[in-house]
Image (cartoon, helix red, strand yellow):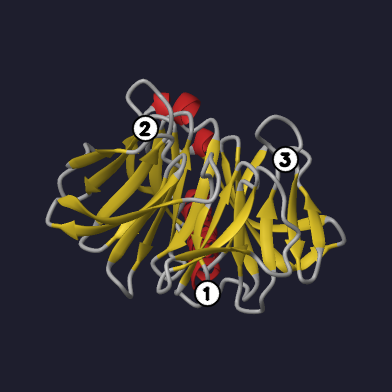
Amino acid sequence: MKKQLLTKAITFILSTLLINFVGIAQTMPPKSFLVCGDSQVLIVDYSQSKDSIPAVIWTWDAREALDIPELYRTTKFKTMDDCKAIENGKKVLVSSSSGAVAIVDIATKKVAFYAEVPNAHSIALLPKNKLIAAASTAKTGNTIMLFDMNKGNEPVFTDTLYSAHGAVWDDARKRLYTLGYEVLREYKVSGNKLDLVQHWKIPGVGGHELSMLPNHNQLFITEHHGTWVFDIQSQKFDKIKNFPDRENVKSLGLDQSAQYIYTVPEESWWTFHVNFHNPARKLAFPNLHVYKARWFY
């Protein structure tokens, strides 16, 4: 009898936890953001954060992900450097410069897909269950890698791109944008390969961040010496108005309320804070080597 009651109690607790996870995925606070660094990805409720203390509502730590091989848990996901919400906030894309990318289900924390990518610096989800990864400087890096997740975790197509750092899928135009050391490229998907449509020299070197604005007509681009906005229609780069331009901005985003989120290194490549502008704010993550932060949308 006691054993049956214990079993029922455990089942109830596990069911409640699952419901709570599903609830988080379906009812994410309207103003929340992703943070990635070390082996972790966090979701933070901006509105519930107090002063400089973030209200963390969800965490995925690769070290605890028993559904991926030990090498990935202990080594390949040691340095998270990008994280993006996908599928209406049900899953998150993650990449690690230690050499891997993954898709994590928010409700269950299960890894839906993972693959080895040397010095991975960004990822994007494409139609028909495809994924693109940007592999930066490494022996087998300096490339963009296309995966057909229906066919496994080996790339079906690659293209050389020195210091590949950014990847954004434009669903309205059905185009892929990628960012390298000194070039922005536009591709179209042709089956299991990518066709280069056009490219532009960026206004600087060391291309780093590439993200789409909420209007879906412009891209944010950062490089060693500053931050830029690229208008897709006019194909022109301009300085970002009303933004405190900085060197070496690692991530940059804008939400529907026109508030910026960005990260700037404090030591080497990492920071212990996530910055906001319009209005200005700074949230502290003293125990995490933060690389990027993104609005959750």
Q: CA distance from mark 3 to mark 2?
A: 25 Å
Q: Amino acid at mark 3?
A: Thr
Q: Which residue is mark 3?
A: 271
Q: CA distance from mark 3 to mark 1?
A: 25 Å
Residue nearer the viewer, 220 or 254: 220
Circle number at residue 142: 2
Whether the residues at callouts 3 and 1 have beta carbons within 8 Å, the answer is: no
Residue 293 in view here: no
* Mark 1 neighbour class, 10 Å CA radius: few under 14, some 14 to 19, many 20 or more: some
Residue 209, given in percent of the width and then of the height, sits at 54, 50
Mark 3 residue element? loop
Q: Name the mark nearer the viewer: 3 or 1.
A: 1
Judged left or right of residue 266, residue 129 is left
Q: Which residue is mark 1?
A: 214
Judged left or right of residue 286, residue 1 is left
* Mark 2 neighbour class, 10 Å CA radius: few under 14, some 14 to 19, many 20 or more: many
Above or below, 55 relative to 102: below
Residue 253, given in percent of the width and then of the height, sits at 60, 62
